[in-house]
Image: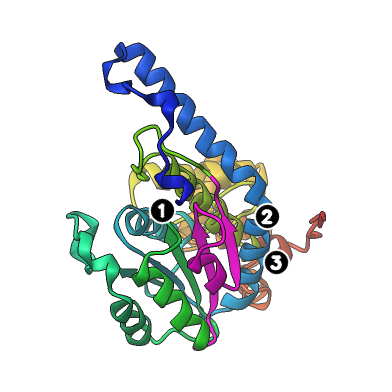
Amino acid sequence: MMSTEKYDSRFADLETWPSAEALQALHEDQLAAVAAVGPALPDIGRAADAAAERLGDRGRLIYAGAGTSARIGAQDGVELTPTFNWPDERIVYLIAGGDGALVRSVEGAEDSADNGRLNVLKAQAGKADIVIGLAASGTTPFTVAAVEQARTLGALTVGVANNANTPLLNAADCPVLLDTGPEAIAGSTRMKAGTAQKVFCNLFSTLVMMRLGRVYRGMMVDMRASNDKLRRRAERMVVQLTDCSADDAVEALKGAGGDLKLAVMLASGFEQAAAQAALARHGGNLRAALGEPAEIALRA
């Protein structure tokens, strides 16, 4: 039996416990889910580095899954555009049951391997793309077939499962096991397994964006300043990164047309044409464009 489906006798009669005790137990189980990601960090790092190297200037992040896993993948992907200015057209969702399954359960859809393969073919996944398959069981036919098909087309595949030695992990170029074990409510993988998958997505996509130069000094310098709150954040970032005045930050952002990286360079004393050329030459990497050393320590 899969570990995520096992019954944990510690939680027998959980529903009869006083609320404070039940919540304490559930909270501790969530903390255990986060801890379960720890042993997978080396695999997550290898997958993220490989993804960043493969994506280039046209590769896509393609999330594949069913049910809770699909919704977790979509939640991660949709945040990459406002946070890191990742292009909308470079994010694809392959969801068992279609987009409607994001807000309404379509349970039987996950059983169709044919639809998993068809979705990948329709998306025209290729060698520059990264396909991330998420499934707590590691056996979901839709997700396993999607990853298998993507791999045959040359895409880099990442398989994330909460059970060891499963078809999804065996099918992927980069397998990631999140060994969360039995759930407090047996089989309810939206709980521990889902939490661990969300942590994986946070770590994986953030590291990918860091490696692609979309983070500088711990700040989201590719952020889209699409509302007043984010415009104020952009102004504060320019001030923090250049030690210029608040007024100068506003002027730099205005001169840069809202482009935060360009504004930092203008506030740092670069002429506009030279700043634009440096950013283009270094693929938008602000650290490199400013002429700073990478200072990345590679650890085994």
Instruction: Tell me if 64 is positioned left or right of 220 in this view.
Output: left
Of the numbered discs 1 and 2, the one sitting upstream in the chain is: 1
Report x, y in % for residue 62: 43, 71
> Residue 225, which numbered label?
1
Q: Amino acid at mark 3?
A: Ala
Between 54 and 65, the residue placed more toward the observer is 65
* In the foreground, 61 or 257: 61
Q: What percent of the width, then of the height, locates residue 86?
A: 46, 66
Question: Distance between the Cα atoms at labels 2 and 3?
Answer: 11 Å
What is the quadrant of residue 172 in the picture? bottom right
Secondary structure under the numbered disc 1 in the rendered image:
loop
Q: Please identify the quarter of the rendering in which residue 110 is found.
A: bottom left
The span picked out in magenta is 153-179
Give me the disc on residue 268: 2
Residue type pointed to by label 2: Ser
Q: Nearer the viewer, residue 239 or 119?
A: 119
Mark 3 or mark 1, which has the lower sequence index? 1
Q: Say whether residue 95 is left or right of residue 59.
A: left
| Total numbered badges shown on the rendered structure | 3
Q: Which mark is residue 289?
A: 3
Is 118 left or right of 296, judged from the image as shown?
left
Quadrant in which the C terminus appears: bottom right
